[in-house]
Amino acid sequence: MTRPPGQGPLAGLRVVELASFIAGPYAGQLLADLGADVVKIEIPEGGDPFRAFAGGGYGPHFLAYNRNKRSIALDVRDDVGRRAVRRLLEDADVLVENSRPGVMDRLGLGYDTVRSWNERLIYCSVTGFGQDGPDAHRPVYDTVGQAVGGMLGQNLEPDRPRIVGPAMADGIAGLTAAYAVLAALHARDRIGTGQHVDVSMFASVAAFLASEASLWHHTGDRGGPRRRPSLSQSYAFGCADGRVMTVHLSSPPKFWQGLLAAVGRRDLLDDPRFATREARIENFEELHDLLAAEFARRSSAVWEQLLADHDVPHARVNAIDEVFAEPQARHLGLELRLRHPTQGEVVTVAPPARFSETPWSGLQAPPVLGEHTESVLSEVGLAGGSADPRDSHRGSGSDPF
């Protein structure tokens, strides 16, 4: 099979993505950023639903998770489309899919079937609850994954519960899937065969909360929205200019001492309510209110200087647009600008890891729906880019699905 030249640590690997929304596509994008050739298969009618999440077919939500991929439009529900998918999978290294358990089997693309075509394939399934068990077939989106996995229980204020924040469960599941695929690829080099990688949002979120789970198992403390901040001595204070400043002291005494020096309250060093870390944890709310009154007297710029002078871990709370204005963001090149030949400029977040010997480069803007159908299908021997295997002379690959 002809594959486009690639760069990065995963150059030469082909990933087929049959996934939509966030978790599966995020895993695919992480692999694409590392140099893999990721072929995203989308239904012809509208493609990945995330394309139109904010209107249009090239919306910002889709752009966030589909960089550096090639899109082909195939209806995997009919025989012609499934045969074309088979051609791709026969010589692929990885399949990423995020359908509910049983859907891929009904499409004739279940693991056992696909393995019979290509025993070296890493078949990664990303689901809400896994492939089996009492909850396997429940519908799941990010908030459900956060709720059942324990994350919302750590973040929601019980007196006024309200969902806030980004799609953490989706992101964690996508990261888990990408690292699991890399492990399975390494194992393939050792044992000679691929395998099924089963990643669930539920397990991924629960594993992410390892510290909270360990605290409960060993002390009976169930945590909650104020528990980790009290243990880690993390604070958020409003300043005189309306900005919010955060401070994270952790356990080294020097940071507590530095904070009091910056605030001008060294007297609190001898206050029995706060003299030890244990006392500060116990009296967290009282200490927070006391310090909040001090921070309200000065602007965030003054506090940034004072806290920096005393080497206190701190940060002003940035809105998303301010992240990319940070000098360190410019130094790291976090704002990545890509140009699509028909859609214009796409601005996204650059891959976070840097490699000294196999750097990522030549990243491409997310594709429009079906942009690469003809070229990809031609690479697998379907003449003229046709999804109908009768147009090819590949031989055994044209056997009935």
Image (cartoon, helix red, strand yellow):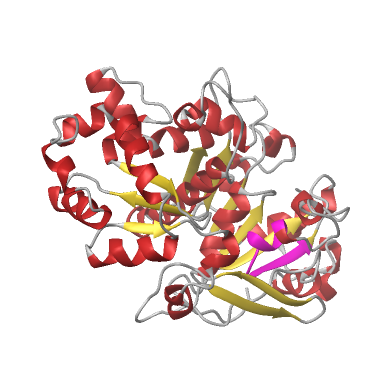
In the picture as drawn, the residue positioned furthest to the left comes out as: 270
Residue 130 visible in the shown view: no
Q: In this view, does 232 lie to the left or right of 365?
A: left
User: Where in the figure is residue 100, as x and y percent of width and height?
Assistant: 66, 34
In the picture as drawn, the residue positioned furthest to the front comes out as: 297
Q: In this view, does 262 lie to the left or right of 170?
A: left
Q: How many marks?
A: 0
Q: Vertical placement of 107 versus 58: above or below?
A: above
Quadrant the N terminus occupies: bottom right
Q: In which quarter of the image is residue 322?
A: bottom right
User: Where in the figure is residue 251, as x and y percent of width and height?
Assistant: 18, 44
- Residue in view at x 13 percent, y 30 percent: 272
User: Where in the figure is residue 80, as x and y percent of width and height?
Assistant: 84, 54
- Residue in view at x 38 percent, y 35 percent: 209
Question: What is the span of residues highlighted in magenta in the rendered image?
Answer: 61-72
Q: Vertical placement of 226 versus 216: above or below?
A: below
The one nearer the camera, 30 or 13, is: 30
Q: Vertical placement of 200 versus 265: above or below?
A: above
The one nearer the camera, 101 or 320, is: 320
Q: In which quarter of the image is residue 342?
A: bottom right
- Residue in view at x 76 percent, y 71 percent: 372
- Residue in view at x 61 percent, y 34 percent: 163
User: Where in the figure is residue 149, as x and y percent of width and height?
Assistant: 48, 29
Residue 239 visible in the shown view: yes
Q: Any magenta on residue 373?
A: no
Q: Is residue 134 left or right of residue 239?
A: right
The one nearer the camera, 200 or 64, is: 64
